[in-house]
Amino acid sequence: MENRSATFKGSKHFRLNQVAEGVFAVISVPGTGSLGNAAIIDLGDSTLVVDTFTTIQAAEDLQAAAMYLTGNPVSYVVNTHWHSDHTSGNQVFITKAQIISTSITREIMATFGEKRLAQQLSNPQPIYQAIDEAEKKAQQEMDERLKKDMEWENASDREYMKMLPHLVYTLPTMTFDQQMRIYGSERTVQLITYGGGHTQSDAFVYLPEEKIAVMGDLVLSKHHPVMNHANPQEWLNILGQVELLSIETIVPGHGEICSMKELHEVKGYINDIVALVEEHVQSKKSIDDILVPKAYQDWYFSTYFKSNLKKVYDLITKSND
């Protein structure tokens, strides 16, 4: 079969990359309405999409790409976790597709997620103000890498706010707690969760025949892992279990298609952050003095480094109380 990803008319939100016959990584273009990556998997008689981007427009382009590449409407959508860059496009697919997540992810979306959206809609002004302030800060930033990150983040936030009045928050219609299989006429996919690490509950999609995993934000490629809702030790435990699977190719939540090498880099990052914070707590030094280690200085999402330190600091000091 020809590589149809090469002839897709394109989207400003993403690039298509064929990973295997009928398996496509949908790689986010920074500063657009996608923010996270997605994936399209041709099951033969049906189509599965993994994650649905930050905006309706990006999700509509994703839906069009899936139909173009597979010839079938999307029958299944998997939300790897509850964050909005992986779930906001759900409404585009709900009329024809089952939307699947873990039970915990759905519960968070039905409570915290819906409440947060209601607050954003009723009082958007503080968000616009924060974006304006962040934009000024970005203009003054001397570090070019950090400046670019901040500009992309602001552009994505503006795309989200532009879409917000039209957002219909759409919950998963089907849940699972450990594993679930979807059998197509051409291939079977496994949905797996080992618990929560990046968030309170993270799932990934595993294609054992092709040795491919679509990992959500459990694995990022050359991006700082985002630890705002993380449990670092559980994250490491989950990655340890993933290592036992037969995987050669990873579609990460952010960044380019990668391999187990990047999974090991994420493990190294989490271990390094925890060690750095522990060392500063023990010697009663401020975590504000911690600089980005050399190994991660050219990684994207550098704006998250300080908040990652703070998250780990809060966890360590709380456990010491």
Image (cartoon, rainbow, N blue to C red):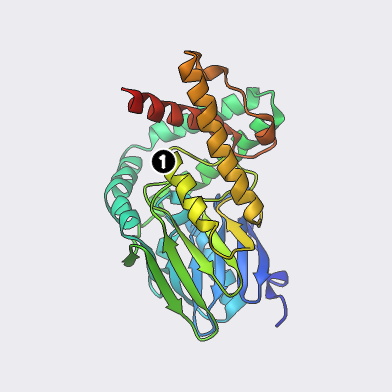
Task: Classify residue 118 as left or right of residue 20.
Answer: left
- In this rendering, does residue 255 appear at all? no
Please report the residue visible at 58 percent of the width from the left and 21 percent of the height from the top: 290
Q: Quadrant of residue 68?
A: bottom right
Quarter of the image for residue 81 reads bottom left
299 vs 214: above or below: above
| Residue that numbered label 1 is attached to | 231
In depth, the one of 61 and 197 nearer the eye is 197
Q: Amino acid at mark 1?
A: Asn
User: In the image, is 70 to the left or to the right of 128?
Assistant: right
Q: Is residue 140 above or below residue 231?
A: above
Q: Residue 284 in the image: state x and y as whole percent.
A: 47, 13
**Residue toward you, 250 or 87:** 250
Circle 1 — which element?
A: loop
Q: Residue furthest top?
A: 284
Q: Residue furthest front?
A: 244
Q: On the rendered image, what quadrant is the N terminus found in?
A: bottom right
* Vertical position of residue 147 compared to residue 206: above or below: above
Count every numbered label the image shows and give the total: 1
> Residue at the location (35% across, 41% down)?
120
Tell me if residue 149 comes above or below residue 316 in the rendering. Answer: below
> Residue 143 location, x and y as percent?
69, 26
Q: Residues within 10 Å of mark 1 (few under 14, many from 20)?
A: some
Residue 166 percent across, percent down from the top left? 40, 54
